[in-house]
Image (cartoon, rainbow, N blue to C red):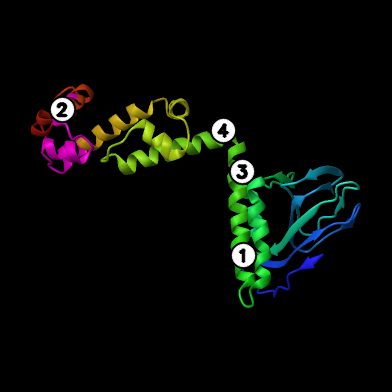
Amino acid sequence: MHHIPLLNKCFKDINPLICGWETCDKGHFFGPASREYYLIHFIISGSGIFERAGKRYPLSKDSLFLIRPYELTFYKADNDNPWEYIWIGFNGSSAPDLLKNSGFSDGICTMHIPSLRNTFLSMKDAENMQHSSELYLCGKIFELFSYVSEEFSQTQKGSSTSVYCKRAKDYIMANYASQLSVESIANMLGIDRRYLCRIFNKHTGNTPQNFIVNYRLEKAALLLSKHGYTVAEAGRSTGYDDIYNFSKMFKKKYGIPPSLYRSDL
């Protein structure tokens, strides 16, 4: 067992208290016992079991288990393939919200997240820091929760599709004057174009392309009516380099060409 000697800096938001690692002997166990702080173990290799609230969780490589303050738990290394793990213990006023927002509801205490391996391995580097190991581990705890939150959002399909849709809409509304395409927006989000069209229609009742066109034309009408822009100025300011196409699309939506829309004001 190896511990990094840490000072209790009493950081308000996230405050690292302990960090260490161990290659366990066969059948090595701890508990039933509790802690006064949050404690997360990440399994580097091997396997074992974790018990909490009468439930047993078999765990192996790239899994983690969470122990909450004053929670009685028991964990034991496998008799044939004992685990090696790294742990980080912390408290702080932001800890409950970080846990909740990353998917650790009251009934969740284990996760399998291979992408966290490097984060935990890099925690060992704190041992070589003479004056900033606690600050360094604060950053690693936030990094840890960023990965956990990302993993949790990917498993919540309903909420993740709405997030994709919201990001697409916000991107369009912030960049409508630029050259936009559904393909480029999907690539920006890291999803397939057809998938974006399907979820966008599900959440808005409209296609991304129609949303782009309607939003641009609404902005163009506002520029014509409220700001006195010429047809060419309104078209260019809303992403239309081809003024003929702009006039055609505008008339289709509003029933009159933009020149008359402006003159009728």
Q: Secondary structure at mark 2?
A: helix
Between marks 2 and 3 in the image, the one whose residue lies nearer the viewer: 3
* Horizontal relation, residue 35 to residue 123: left or right: right
In the rendered image, residue 230 lying in the magenta stretch gets the answer: yes
* Horizontal relation, residue 44 to residue 74: left or right: left
Q: Earlier in the sequence, mark 3 or mark 1?
A: 1
* Horizontal relation, residue 101 to residue 17: left or right: left
Whether label 1 touches label 2, CB < 8 Å:
no
Q: Where residue 69 sits: x, y (%)?
A: 77, 59
Q: Earlier in the sequence, mark 1 or mark 2?
A: 1
Q: Where residue 50 sits: x, y (%)?
A: 83, 48
Whether label 2 touches label 3, CB < 8 Å:
no
Return the residue found at the far bottom: 131
Q: CA distance from mark 2 to mark 4?
A: 39 Å
Tag 2: amino acid? Ser
Tag 4: amino acid? Gly
Tag 3: amino acid? Glu
- The mark found on residue 94 in the picture is none
For image coordinates 46% across by 25% down, the residue present is: 198
Q: Where residue 57 sits: x, y (%)?
A: 82, 43
Between marks 4 and 1 in the image, the one whose residue lies nearer the viewer: 1
Tag 1: amino acid? Cys
Mark 4 lies on residue:
158
Q: Earlier in the sequence, mark 3 or mark 4?
A: 3
**Quadrant location, the C terminus:** top left
Mark 1 lies on residue:
138
